[in-house]
Structure formats: structure tokens, C-alpha cells
Image (tube, helix red, strand yellow):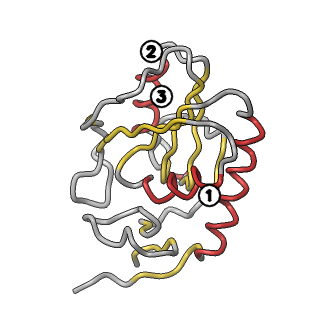
Amino acid sequence: MSPKLKKLIKSQEIDSAVLRLASELSRDYRGKNPLLIGILKGSFIFMADLVRRLDIPLEVDFVRLSSYGSGTESSGKIRMLGRLSRPVEGRHIIVVEDIVDTGLTVDYLLRYIRRKKPASAVLCALTEKPTRRKVDVKIDYLGFTVPDKFIVGYGIDWNERYRNLPDICYIE
């Protein structure tokens, strides 16, 4: 039996937030050729839409990290399943994430990146759940704050399902 989904953020609202974030990033990174690093798999739709809206030179890379496995609760143990293919040292880095929940995953990645001596490293997240935070993580560019519910859609999954939903929904 499939879980019941309730719409939380409509696709039009997501589109407006992506446009706003792209505008802010384009303004702040003009002339800097940033490297955007997407955290797979959840960020791929957000990152694709964001990159298409940026009007500055940039490069992209991806890394795979996992803390969930097949459940709806973070295990707290971060695993890096893929490495960066672009050099980070001296670059302006923008980490792109679908959701900052406990903060453990992005904290892990940002610490990893900062050890490689970038010119700067910031976080751009589509969503955050501050009520679940275990690690203090600064989100420099944020789309939405969401309630403490398990969300899916727009790239965010539950057991590899629901990534293709155009809206962000929560599982009841």
C-alpha cells in the first residue's frame, strides 16, 4: 500500500524560489566562475533548474553522500559514495543540497571541502528542517523552511520513489 501524500509546496512556488536563489547567486558570484557541487541524488532536479537560471560562468560537479539507507530517519553515519572530479583549491564553491535536516551530511561535506582550501564555500539549500538539526550549519541561500515531516518530490525521495513529483509533498 502506498503512503498518503499531501502537497506542501506547489511547483510554481518552487520555481519562484529557484529564480530568486539564482538571482542572488548571479549577483554575488559575478566574475568569480564558481564551482557548484550538487549532493546526489536528491539535489539533481534543483541543481539543474538552478544552473539553467544562473547568468554567470560556472562549473558543476557532484558527490554522492548517504545517511539514510532505506528508512525515513537519518542513520547519523555519513558515507561518501563518490568523489569530486573538479579541483576545489582556490575556487569559490557553492554546495547545492535538496534538504538540510540534521545537518550532518552537509557539515561532513563542507568540512571535507574546506580542508581542500577553497577561496570560499557556501551552502545553497532548497529546503531545511531546523527542528531536526543536530549540527549547526549555516545555510547561505535558502528556498524554504519546512515542518518536521518526511518530504518527497522535486528530486527528494523515499526509497527511490517520488523524485519525479513536480511539487514537494509530505508523507502522512
Comparing labels 1 and 3, the label whose residue is closer to the camera: 3
Residue 110 marker = 3
First of labels 2, 1 by sequence position: 2
Residue 145 marker = 1
Residue at mark 1 to residue at mark 3: CA–CA distance: 20 Å
Q: 134 above or below 127?
A: above
- Name the kind of residue labelled 1 in the image: Thr
Q: How many numbered discs, if any? A: 3
State the residue position of label 2: 116
Who is closer to the viewer here, 172 or 35? Answer: 35
Q: 9 above or below 48?
A: below
Quadrant in the picture for residue 3: bottom left
Q: Position of residue 35 (x, y in %)?
A: 53, 32
Q: Position of residue 169 (x, y in %)?
A: 48, 74
Residue drawn at x 36%, y 29% as measured from the top left: 84
Q: Is residue 38 shown left or right of residue 130?
A: left
Q: Position of residue 99 (x, y in %)?
A: 49, 52
- Name the kind of residue labelled 2 in the image: Lys
- Name the kind of residue labelled 3 in the image: Leu
